[in-house]
Image (cartoon, rainbow, N blue to C red):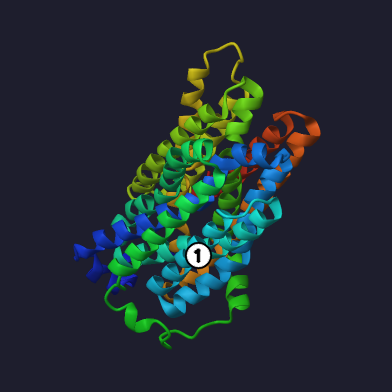
Amino acid sequence: MKHIHESDAPAGRQAASAPYRWWVLTAAVTAQTTAAVATQGIGVLGGFLQADLQLSHASVGVLAGVLNVAPIVGLMLAGEWLDRAGERRVIGMGALIMALAMTLAGITTTFPGLLFCLFFVGIGYSTAQPGGTKAVFHWFPVRERGLAMGVRQAGLPLGGVVAAALFPGIASHIGWQAAFLVGASVIVSGGALFCLVYRSSPGVASRHGSAESPQQPWLLYARRLLTAPRFRLAVVAGVALITVQTVALMFLSLYLRDRFGLPLVAGTGHLLVMQLFGAAGRVLLAAWSDKIRHGRPLIVLITAVGSLLGLCALGLFPGHWSPDLLYLASAWLGFFGFGWYGPWVAWISELSPRHRLGTTLGLAMAINQVAIAGSPILFGCLVDVFGNYAVPGGLLATSLLIYIAYAGLRMLKREGV
C-alpha cells in the first residue's frame, strides 16, 4: 500500500492556497477539545467517583472501559459514514449524542446508571477523531500536514486541561454530577461551532457518495489493510502507546495518592501538567515529522522510548525526594506519552487511499479502542490483586519494549544495516 504524495492530491493543492484552511483547523481543534472534555474528564473525576460511589480500583477502570467500548464498533461505522456523508454532518450528530449522554450522567446517582450514560458518550465520541482528522487532511498539503494534524490532535490533551481545570473544583464544591452537566454544555458548543464554520475542501464535497472509485466491501478492505506491513507496524505502535496514555490518564492521580500520599487535588495538578505538555508534544513532534526522513514512523518510535523513560522515572522515584520533582516526570511522560498521537495519525492518514480515508482512520482507531477499553480494567485488577503498582507498571514498560524492539529492527532492516 503506497503513501499518498502531494502530487496525488490536486484538491489538497487548491485548498493549501486558501486562508480558510486555518479556520477549518481552528474549528476542528475546538470540536476535538470540547469532545475530549468527556473522555479525559473521567480520569480527572475518577477519585471523586471512587469516594462517592465506594468503588474499587477495578471499578474505576470499568468506567473508563465502558466509555471506550462503544467506539470499538462506533469508529468503524463512523469511518464508513464519513466517506459517504461528510465531516460536518457526522461530527455534529456525534456532539449532540455526547451532550445528551453527559446530561443524563449529570442526573444519575448510581454506578449502573453512570455506566449506561458513559456507553453513549463513547458512541458520540466515535465521530470526533476520524471526522476532525479527515477534515484537516483534505485542507492541508503534505508539507504542512504533520503540523496541522499535530495542532488538531492537541485538542485531546487540551480537553484534558479544560477538564482538569474545571471538574475538580466543581466536584469538590457541588458534586461530580454538576461536572457532567458543565461538560455537556461545553461539548454541544464545540460541535455547533464546527458545523457553522466547516465546509468541504474544493473537489471533495462533490465526491461524497459518488462512484469515483469502486467501494470495496468493508471486510475485504480491512483485510487488505491488515496484511500491509507498514499499516501493521503503525497499528502495533498505536496499541502500545495508547495503552500507556490511557493508564496514565486513569491512574496517575491514584498512584500519586497511594504511593506518595499526595491528595487527589494535587494529583489532578499533575494530570494538568501532563496534558499541557502532551498538547505541546503533539504539535512539536508532528511538525518535526514533516522535516525529517522516515518522519512519521521514526518520531513515533522516539516517543515510545521517551514514554518508557517517563514510566521508569515515575516508578523508580525515591520516596524521600521532594514531591515537587514529580512534576518533571509527569511533564516528560505527557510530552512523549501523549505527544505521539499527532505524528501517528498523520502516518495512518498517508497510508490510505483518499476515497477511503474515513474507513482507514476508523479501523486503525477502532483497534486502538480495544486497548483503551481493556487496559484500565486489566491494570486496575492487577493493582487490586497485587496491592501495588510494580507488576502492572512492569508489564506496561514491557509492552513498550516489545514495540521498540520490533520497530527498531524493521527500521534497521529497511536501511540495510
Q: Amino acid at mark 1?
A: Leu
Q: Is residue 416 visible?
A: no
**Residue 19 x/y as whole percent:** 19, 62
Say left or right for 378 vs 286.
right
Residue 40 x %, y %: 51, 47
* Residue 294 x %, y %: 42, 50
Q: Residue furthest top?
A: 320
Residue 384: quadrant of the picture: top right
Q: Is residue 107 left or right of residue 336?
A: right
The number of callouts visible is 1
Along the viewing direction, whichever of 53 and 36 lies nearer the viewer: 53
Which is nearer the eye, 282 or 255? 255
Q: Residue furthest right?
A: 385
Residue at image coords 55%, 53%: 106
Residue drawn where x is 57% and y is 30% of the image: 264
303 is higher (above) or lower (below) than 140 = above
Relative image position of residue 251 (x, y in whole percent)? 62, 37
How crowded pointer 1 is (Cα within 10 Å; few <14, some 14-19, many 20+) is rated as many
Residue 110 shows in the view: yes
Is 371 drawn above or below residue 171 in the view shown?
below
Q: Secondary structure at mark 1?
A: helix
Q: Quadrant of residue 364?
A: bottom right
Residue that mark 1 sits on: 361
Which residue is drawn at the image coordinates 39% and 63% (left, top)? 191
Residue 270 against residue 75 in the figure, above or below: above
Q: Does residue 263 sit above or below 320 in this rendering?
A: below
- Residue ID at (49%, 30%): 270
The foreground one among 291 and 329 is: 329
